[in-house]
Image (cartoon, grey):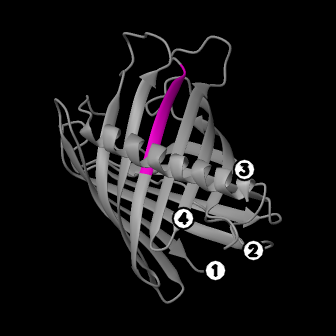
Amino acid sequence: MGNENCKQVFLQRYAVAIASTFIFNVLLSADVNAAPEEIQVYLDDFADVGKPGLDLHTNFVSSGSQSTYHQFRVTPEFSYGINTNWEVAAYWLTVKDPGGSPQTDGMKLRTRWRPKAPSTASIFYWAVNVEVGQLSRRFYQDQTSGEIKLIGVWKTDPWTLGMNLNLDRALKSHPIQAATSEIDTKIAYQIREGLQLGIENYSFLGANHSDPNQPQSSHSNYWATDFNLGKWDFNVGIGRTLGQSPETVLKAIIGVPL
């Protein structure tokens, strides 16, 4: 009984930590970066074993600085479930600037591992995501990138709380850009089966050591809804970045049935 009480206390403290981090990040104010290729807080979703999956990550800058105004990104992501513990995926970065032709910004490969699938026996879930990318110079100066994403999720109906810690760096000996970190959080409330409303926060913490040539921090907040239409899954949201050059971004992640 003592162990069970300790476990409940740990889970409660974890939930409080996520909520506190989320609120702290929302209250921050910082400079702004262009919308990334993927605006998503990773939760406990996972590719079905032996089956391919397709997600379309899209976002559109409806207002912002001259360099990103009306920029539209589409990032197809193909995934495959190897077994209950491992999945792999590849995605291609494409962008269209106003008045320009569609361009590619490179591709990324990733793999995700979890010790076990989520179950009703435990309200806590965690996983690790690792990705590498070969990117265009205009998108990422060092061109080769790597990321480790630590995923934590706490669920108790009707609430879902999630936190991602992202650690990024170039995959070369003498990179131009410094290693960076980011914390992404999500709080969602289930209205009914297949419909959730929530708030997502993306807080780029900047370089892990002082680098005057690199943005030190940025953050954005999104109102988002998750819902299903038949076999199609949707995450749709509108977000605002705060700072000297505010941006409003519309985003949609579309899960395509295959």
For the residue marked with disc 3, what is the amino acid? Thr
Disc number lying in front (4 or 1): 4
The answer to whether residue 84 of the structure is visible from this angle is yes
Percent position of residue 50, x then y: 81, 72
User: Does 191 sit above or below residue 38?
Assistant: below
Regarding mark 2 in the picture, which secondary structure is present there? Answer: loop
Q: Which residue is mark 3?
A: 111
Q: CA distance from mark 2 to mark 1?
A: 9 Å
Determine if residue 39 is in view: no
Magenta-highlighted residues: 179-185
User: Does label 4 or label 3 sit earlier along the sequence?
Assistant: 3
Residue on which the image places disc 4: 155
Secondary element at tag 3: strand
Where, quadrant-wise, is the N terminus in this rendering? Answer: bottom right
What secondary structure is marked by label 4?
strand
> Cβ–Cβ below 8 Å for labels 3 and 2?
no
Q: Is residue 183 inside the magenta stretch?
A: yes
Q: Looking at numbered disc 4 in the image, what kind of residue is underneath it? A: Lys
Q: Residue at x 52, y 72 (%)?
A: 255
Q: Which mark is residue 258?
A: 1
**Sequence-wise first label, 1 or 3:** 3
Q: Earlier in the sequence, mark 2 or mark 4?
A: 2
**Mark 4 nearby-residue class (10 Å; few <14, some 14–19, many ≥20):** some
Looking at the image, is mark 4 or mark 3 nearer the viewer?
Answer: 4
Rounded to the nearest angstrom, the CA distance separating label 1 from label 3 is 20 Å
Disc 2 designates what residue?
A: 51
* Residue at figure coordinates x 36%, y 47% from the top left: 201
